[in-house]
Image (cartoon, grey):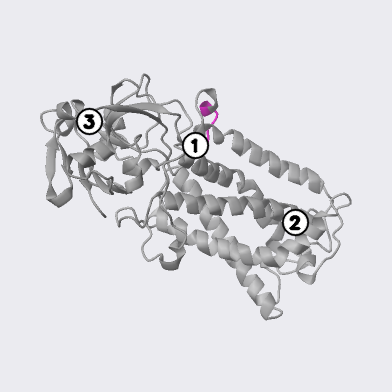
Amino acid sequence: MPRSPSSPAFWRSPLRGPWFTSVLGVVLLVGITVLFVTGLVSYAAYNPDLSPVNDQTPDKGLLGFYLFSWPTHPSWLYRLTQGVHVTLGIVLIPVLLAKLWSVVPKLFALPPARSLAHALERLSLLLLVGGGLFEFTTGVLNVQLDYIFPGSFYPLHFYGAWVFFAAFVAHAVLKTPLALRNLRHLRDETPVETSVEEGELVSPNPAEPTVSRRGALGVVGGGSLLLLATTAGRSFDGPLRETAVLAPHGGPEPGGGPGGFQINKTAAYAGISPAETGEEAWRLVVTGHDGRSVRLARPQLLRLALHSSALPIACVEGWSTSDQWWRGVRLRDLAALVGHDDPVDVLVESLQRHGAFRRAALRANQVADPRSLLALFVNGEDLTPDHGYPARVIVPAAPGVLNTKWVARMTFGDL
């Protein structure tokens, strides 16, 4: 028996072959394309070109060519795109692992390069495997709130996505035609054409089969369906939310009553004390045109025109809530208080002193939306401390971290 992984006879599974690999490859071709697009959309939702405080990926250069002003309609837009991105990424994990298992003999094949074209293919394969493992691993860790990787998740995942997708496109261009030809022969599982490289997947001395290739695909599909059933519920409400047992936001909502919906960061975690949010101490500073500034206590805010909006909250980790009823002062009305009759950009600063997104910038179109509020109430009662008391921002379709809690200062103007 051969002892070296570089020998084709070392790999004895009868499941490996062009047909099995082609089926998995076509599934990943569609799934990873959707992941890449929804990932770029998520990055655009942070409006990174608006202000340095929003930009978690410095020196992106040409990689930011597609950025656009994130819209506020429909209000559930980010809830949909990020929910699809995270849920699909988790669901594709069994498919990705099966695909890597199916082609592992090629990673050890000798000689390393038979020609320049073969060398480029092997390089793209290494980048594809390494990039895929990196992207899926960091994505899962972010969903689980386990930031054990060095540096910020945002630049790591952003740059990793471009490297991975570039290798993915190169690999797809080389292999998709052959994969499609193989899939035309699903009935007899016989590929129409087998290249030297594809032949490396077929063992010259296969072991006795214990399951058919279709059966193996059923196992992979069953694993994906299981992950879907134990993950997708965190994008919904009611009993479905209880099914998301693999996600940190899939269990019971925190507490009950009007404030009993999901949060990411508690007041205690952010270091917000009751002493600094009480009516005697807390003041909102609003600054605008020509340095005009006003200081407003919460009772003064309550005397302004109050409006209500039904808006969800959705976060980058993929969880979301249904519409909550928020009530407060429109952002555009606060801008008018300091001389901006036409809506402009705004920089929002929190009482939170440390951590990412303690400051966030919003675009003029977000300020202009009549549903964008400095919320004082939710579901008919005062905000709870964990939901941002005494005041928080709520903006339709914005990522959760841009809906700043414990607001202390708002500066309107061009950023």
Q: Is residue 58 above or below residue 308?
A: below
Of labels 1 and 3, earlier in sequence is 1
Residue 246 location (% of width, % of height): 52, 36
User: Residue drawn at (37%, 33%), measured in percent from left and top?
Assistant: 263
Residue 156 location (% of width, % of height): 43, 58
User: Toward which corner of the image does residue 192 lie, by quadrant?
Assistant: bottom right
Of labels 3 and 2, earlier in sequence is 2
Give 226 or 43, whichever is nearer the viewer: 43
Category of crowding for the residue at label 3, using alpha-carbon neighbours closer than 10 angstroms: few (below 14), some (14–19), many (at least 20): many
Q: Dot 2 corresponds to which residue?
A: 22
What kind of residue is marked 2? Ser
As helix, strand or loop, the secondary structure at mark 1 comes to loop
Q: Is residue 33 above or below residue 386?
A: below
3D distance between C-alphas at marks 2 and 1: 31 Å
- Which residues are drawn in magenta? 241-246
Q: Is residue 119 left or right of residue 279?
A: right
What kind of residue is marked 1? Ala
Q: Dot 3 corresponds to which residue?
A: 390
Can residue 137 be found in the magenta stretch? Answer: no
By secondary structure, the bulk of the magenta-drawn segment is best described as loop
**Residue 247: mark:** 1
Category of crowding for the residue at label 1, using alpha-carbon neighbours closer than 10 angstroms: few (below 14), some (14–19), many (at least 20): many
